Amino acid sequence: MASAAAPASSEEAVKAAKVLMVGAGGIGCELLKTLALSGFSDIHVIDLDTIEVSNLNRQFLFRKSHVGQSKAHVARDAILKFRPNINIESHHANVKDAQFNVDFFKQFNVVLNGLDNLDARRHVNRLCLAAEVPLVESGTTGFLGQVS
């Protein structure tokens, strides 16, 4: 009797996964840190914003010297300081740009949303549905937050 191949361990599945993080603000910084420390080794991050002084109290990957710089690029550099051997690619761009189409989304095993813009969150949801990629949706509106 032939035995079926053993399923990959959780650790192997994490290492093999390609993850897209949309947003590198308050939620995105926390999720990027958690992804990197959990063993994910292929992460892309998209954010169109630059760092402001008002971000520094809750977006812990950023410092005062980073004000005015790209959130995506600085977050990438910060993650590489404590996980230098992972592949993390940053995109300083709007997730609604044409380059981030269904084919782009199909390359990922999972997408995580950390956006405060409802229109962009809906856009990512539509792309994930079309690409058949699972979406972990989290976001804020004012002082309210949610995840699903």
Image: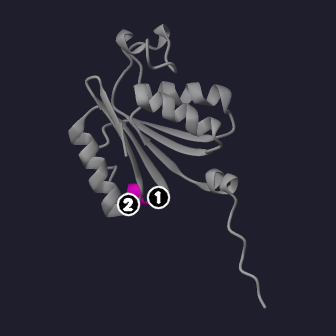
Question: Which residues fall within the magenta stretch?
Answer: 104-108
| Residue 142 as seen in the image, left or right of residue 9 | left
Q: Is residue 137 above or below residue 105?
A: above
| Residue 7 as seen in the image, left or right of residue 95 | right
Secondary structure found at label 2? helix
Identify the image quadrant of the N terminus: bottom right
Q: Residue at x 68, y 68 (%)?
A: 7
- Bin the neighbour count of mark 2 within 10 Å (Cα to Cα): few under 14, some 14-19, many 20 and up: few
Q: Are marks 2 and 1 in contact (CB under 8 Å)?
A: yes
Q: Residue at x 49, y 43 (%)?
A: 44
Secondary structure found at label 1? loop
Residue 103 circle label: 2
Query: Hey, what amino acid is under mark 2?
Result: Asp
Q: Is residue 108 above or below residue 22?
A: below
The residue under label 1 is 107
Query: Hey, what amino acid is under mark 1?
Result: Gln
Main secondary structure along the magenta-highlighted residues = helix
Residue 92, image x and y in percent? 39, 33
Query: Can residue 96 be seen in this snapshot?
Result: no
Q: Residue at the bottom extreme? A: 1
Which of these two is toward me, 93 or 75? Answer: 75
Residue 90, image x and y in percent? 47, 36
Which of these two is toward me, 73 or 34? Answer: 34
Residue 68, image x and y in percent? 38, 15
| Cα separation between marks 2 and 1 | 7 Å
